[in-house]
Image (tube, helix red, strand yellow):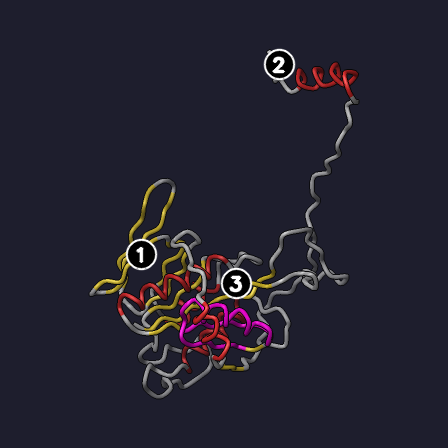
Amino acid sequence: MEILVCVKRVPMVGGRIVVTADGQDVDTRMSGFTVSPHEECAVEEAVRLVERHGGSVTVLTLGPPAAADQLRDMLALGASRAVLLETDGREWGPVATADAIVAAVRSSPAPGGPAAPSASDDPAAPPAPGCPYDLLLFGNEAADTGDYQVGVRVAHALGLPCVTGIKNLEVTDVGARAKREYRGTEEAFDIPLPAVISVKEGINLPRYPSLPGRLRAKRATIERQEPEWHPEGLRKERLRVPAGESKRAAVLGTGPEAVPALLALLDELGVLS
């Protein structure tokens, strides 16, 4: 079973969000980077499927040269091949990102064979005969933009079945069974392979990378491609950080003198009966 997992490099944000002076990007100079949690679960799910059924896992990301670090993190989890669609650092929207992934899939070599035939790099062209992967896994949405679009766009361009929001995945003799939760009930989908599936955080608990896995990932070769950026008709005006709640601490007093003020506050909050 050959599985492609598409991941995204996103900033680790644990503090105040700061926008650049031109209002076009989030200032990440003081942030570390990681892989979106949904996509980390997608890699773990792919590794588990290969452990049960055999095959290999390829991880792919689109981003600047530094995104190779996140690919190595995924190699340490058990993926066997990594592909970086290297950009100049500019932001790619969901349309351009999906186009680049589709072109990469069409040009991917079949396992143990030559590159898949493709008459055109146009993502709108008919799919090349024989997808080189049995499964294309995505995170349900990226942690930074949350646009939910890339996996669906890739499936549409490749002419593959697609299910989203999946919390349980099994591969059967005739395809795959994918399950998701919806309004308190569970929906199940039986789909043929190859297919595109986006998974949600919680489908599994990603493993910690082992020391041999980290050493293997450090030595691994990252395959690099340079996709051509195409404008997608959308223009960003500016980013704005929403106003947060302003909270101030009030000192009620010190010692016994503070008791009346404390009782009045508790009474105002409805704590006292």
Residue 109: x and y in percent read: 38, 83
Residue 126: x and y in percent read: 38, 77
Q: Nearer the viewer, mark 2 or mark 1?
A: 2
Q: Which one is earlier in the sequence, the residue at label 3 or at label 2?
A: 3
Q: Secondary structure at mark 2?
A: loop
Q: Is residue 187 left or right of residue 215?
A: left
Residue 61 in magenta stretch = yes
Cα–Cα span, label 2 and label 1: 52 Å
**106 above or below 24?**
below
Instruction: Quickly name the residue at label 3.
Output: 35
Tell me which residue sits at (70%, 39%) in the image: 245
Residue 202: x and y in percent read: 41, 51
Tell me which residue sits at (56%, 80%) in the image: 228
Instruction: Quickly name the residue at label 2.
Output: 272
Residue placed most toward the observer, 40 or 253 = 253
Residue placed most toward the observer, 66 or 174 = 66
* Amino acid marked by disc 2: Leu
Q: Is residue 246 left or right of residue 157?
A: right
Which quadrant would residue 44 be assigned to in this image? bottom left
Tag 1: Cα neighbours inside 10 Å, few (<14), some, or many (≥20)? many
Residue 61: x and y in percent read: 50, 71
Q: Secondary structure at mark 1?
A: strand
Tell me which residue sits at (61%, 65%) in the image: 234
* Amino acid marked by disc 3: Val
Q: Which residues are magenta?
A: 58-85
Cα–Cα span, label 3 and label 2: 48 Å
Quarter of the image with the C terminus in it: top right
* Amino acid marked by disc 1: Ala
Q: Nearer the viewer, mark 3 or mark 1?
A: 3
Q: Which one is earlier in the sequence, the residue at label 2 or at label 1?
A: 1
Instruction: Quickly name the residue at label 1.
Output: 178
Cα–Cα span, label 3 and label 1: 23 Å
